[in-house]
Amino acid sequence: LVRLRARLARSQNSLGKGLLTLLSREHLDEDTWEEIEETLLIADVGVVPTQELVDRLRERVRVLGTRTPAELRSLLKEELLTLVGTDFDRAVRTESGVDTPGVVMVVGVNGTGKTTTTGKLARVLVADGRSVVLGAADTFRAAAADQLQTWGDRVGARTIRGPEGGDPASIAYDAVKEGIAEGADVVLIDTAGRLHTKTGLMDELGKVKRVVEKHGPLDEVLLVLDATTGQNGLTQARVFAEVVDITGIVLTKLDGTAKGGIVVAVQRELGVPVKLIGLGEGPDDLAPFEPEAFVDALIG
Ligand code: GDP
């Protein structure tokens, strides 16, 4: 929590702290409520959730009458928690089969941090005592397989790869086959995220998915989204959700943005929880998404 707070504090004060400062004004006039609304919109919370939150805050502040700083803080915390959602199941599922490895497919537009996230996730799983096989099915970006293999070598996970420009589905197939042969616990598959045509993407991801499912069920399809991309990220999310059933969201680069509100917007958009967050480029910079810690870090 301390590290999360430190990471987010650098960039995200503007949301929670800003709201608290505004709510603490002696006179909560219309201009102040407008500023509160703007703060939420700038942080990418989205129009509808912003309106809902402002309405609730207005009502609760009115009922409260005189407010102590502590009361305001806990009121804001409660409302932000409601907005982020506390009843999603946010665990990354990795254990569908008894004799077969859990399979996690990682999807998202190139540059969002897909390969890095796959590597970091492998590291977390291995540290947890699970054996991992990596599938380098991003054959579109030249360096992706090397990059993934570097992660694999570092954490002790075998990386299955093919020729550059090769068939992603066959690499995914081989990775799962290898996972079964090795008796691995989890297979993580990094995919390519070129988004120039929806049909192309659909063909490719759909094929990877079908091929993987020949071995058994897919446990998770994690969509990686760059938190700094705002509305653009949401548009991407929509396209991916049309192509594959997303089961969890990874929000990366939360260390570099004041737009933490995207957590709320993307969950609403997809009806799927944020499960992991990226807080930097280093190997330890992937954390489970914990609403309470997140909101605490936002408020500072
Ligand atoms: P991919 O094309 O989606 O596989 O993206 P990469 O995994 O290669 O990541 C693109 C860039 O984003 C790299 O420079 C990563 O180090 C960086 N990156 C990934 N995750 C994070 C994060 O959580 N925070 C920050 N600051 N950078 C990140």
Image (cartoon, rainbow, N blue to C red):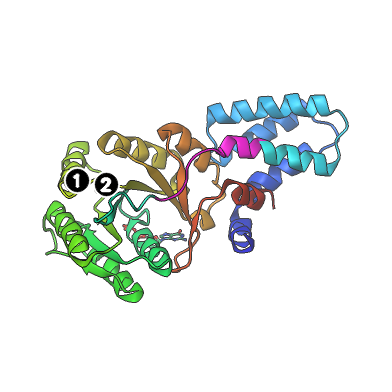
Residue 218, numbered circle: 2
Residue 213, numbered circle: 1
Which residue: 46% across, 41% down? 273
Q: Can residue 39 be seen in this view?
A: no
Asked if marks 1 and 2 touch (Cβ < 8 Å), the reply is yes
On the picture, is 294 further left or further right than 224? Answer: right
> In the rendered structure, which amino acid carries the disc numbered 2?
Leu
Q: Which of 140 and 95 is in front in this view?
A: 95
Which residue: 47% across, 46% down? 90
Question: Is residue 81 found inside the magenta-colored segment of the image?
Answer: yes
- Badge 1: residue crowd in 10 Å (few <14, some 14–19, many ≥20): some
Dot 1 lies on which element?
helix
Residue 124, numbered circle: none
Measured from the top left, where is residue 47 in percent x and y?
54, 29
Q: For the view shown, which residue lies furthest in the front direction?
A: 98
Q: Is residue 273 above or below residue 33?
A: below
Measured from the top left, where is residue 42 in percent x and y?
57, 40
The region drawn magenta spans 79-92
Q: Nearer the viewer, residue 293 or 298?
A: 293
